[in-house]
Amino acid sequence: MSTPTSFVSRYRWSICALLFFATTINYIDRAVLGVLAPLLRDELGWSDQDYGRISAAFTLAYALGFLFAGWFIDRVGTRIGYTAYLALWSLAAAAHALAKGVFGFGIARFVLGLGESGNFPSAIKTVAEWFPKKERALATGIFNAGSNVGAVLAPLIVPWLALTWGWRTAFIVTGLAGLVWIAFWWPIYRRPREHKRISAGELSLIESDPPDAPGKVSWGRLLRFRQTWAFALGKLLTDSIWWFYLFWFPLFMADTFGVDLRTIGLPMITVYVLADVGSVGGGWLSSSLLKRGWSANAARKTAMLVCAACILPVALAPHVEGKWVAVWLVGLAASAHQGFSANIFTLVSDMFPRKAVGSVVGIGGFFGAMGGFMMNLGAGWLRENTGGYSVMFIIAGLAYLAAILVMHLLSPRLEPAKLDANQDGIG
């Protein structure tokens, strides 16, 4: 029979579920424009470069927001910070219904990007607070799967709303749904030591890793560490590809295979269901290798290398004959991206103490979103000037191998950053 101190409750997984739902909402709100892009391009007379600029406005704001988001979350805490960011992005998502012209959509996307920049710093910091290191990759993979669930729900919900009540209704309904999440998060969330619903055994498990040294860490100091740049450049190279899939896949299918708003649902659902499997699978793979005695360095990088190899065939997507071959190629790449992403996020808590996690994720998120900004502008230009998508898919296929190489060169052993040592950050 378990004693009160040996009983391990599982309340931390309820917290993980809240992170999953927040991330789901986050991706529904950002995916609405991509689903509606073929319709809006025709109805509002956008060029491909117009659409690229509107999408780039989101990723630019997302990048700039990340610079502040990690700092803000580290200082006010996840309970207040997550609430503020989710309220902002929900209202901005609904405000797309009021937009007129390219400039109006650009403003709405910019504010949405600022709000959504708070999701991942909040979620990663919450995982670092609520999970021991050995469970963090799995927990990250689970909440990160919400991005794919959101991307699956968007093509199910948005076309129906748009075709039934108009595209403006689609923005309003999906945007305001985020306020429901706040009604659950605010009364439920506390830090583990402040929470009344976890057992002493679970608290002991959560705090089983060596404690972090007290104090704050400045961005200037974090930027002197190779570990920070390993994460940031890895995000720059790989997040740009995810943004490309999210915003350009519906247009790619429309331009290449004649898919429209009524028929885009199943291809998008297929891609993001596969991505869901990859998100959990990538986290499970490295966690499984850790449990078998592998080092964090070997486990994380092996999992990422497997994912990178699975992404290479996506370069063929613009050249295949049938649309479903292209869908499966993009789906495999999206799945492997999410497996890669679950592990690259976990690298932060492997290499940095909890007090710095939010800030490091914010720095990496800035670089990742700037990659998306450049990709969106580049995709619009390439589409209009080359008439196809070949160059973009070649970049998509090779980016992850380049990311692994860069990260390995900068942090060959995933050694922890010695933030509390008197050194210049080179180690």
Image: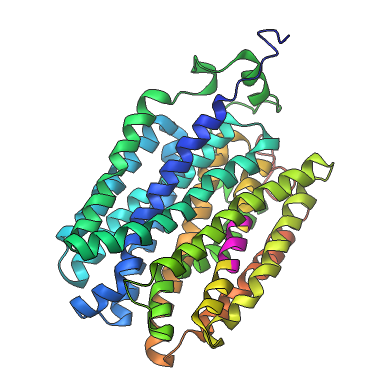
Is 394 positioned to the left or the right of 70 in the image?
right
Please, is residue 111 above or below residue 271 in the view? above
- List x then y, in percent, for residue 159: 29, 64
Magenta-drawn stretch contains 105: no
Using the rendered view, name the quadrant where residue 384 is placed. Answer: bottom left
Image position, residue 260 (x, y; %):
33, 76
| Quadrant of the rendered image containing residue 75 | top left
* Camera sees residue 229: no
Residue 139, compared with residue 337, is above or below; it is above
Identify the residue shown where x is 43% and y is 50%.
67
Query: Residue placed farthest to the bottom in the image?
Result: 386
Q: How many marks?
A: 0
**Residue 258, picture quadrant:** bottom left
State the extent of the magenta-drawn residues as a range.
Answer: 332-339
Residue 162 appears anywhere in the view:
yes
Is residue 334 a member of the stretch shown in magenta?
A: yes
Viewer-closest of 163 and 310: 163
**Residue at (35%, 75%) from the top-left corner?**
52
Residue at 67% x, 43% y is: 351
Q: Quadrant of the N terminus?
A: top right
Residue 183 position, x and y percent, is 31, 31
Q: Is residue 375 left or right of residue 10?
A: left
> Which of the colour schemes (rainbow, by chain, secondary structure, one colour) is used?
rainbow
The chief SS type of the magenta part is helix
Residue 110 location in percent, x, y?
29, 59
Most foreground residue, 212 or 29: 29
Asked if residue 261 is positioned above or below residue 10 in the image, the reply reads: below
Task: Identify which residue is drawn at 46% across, 52% down.
Answer: 149
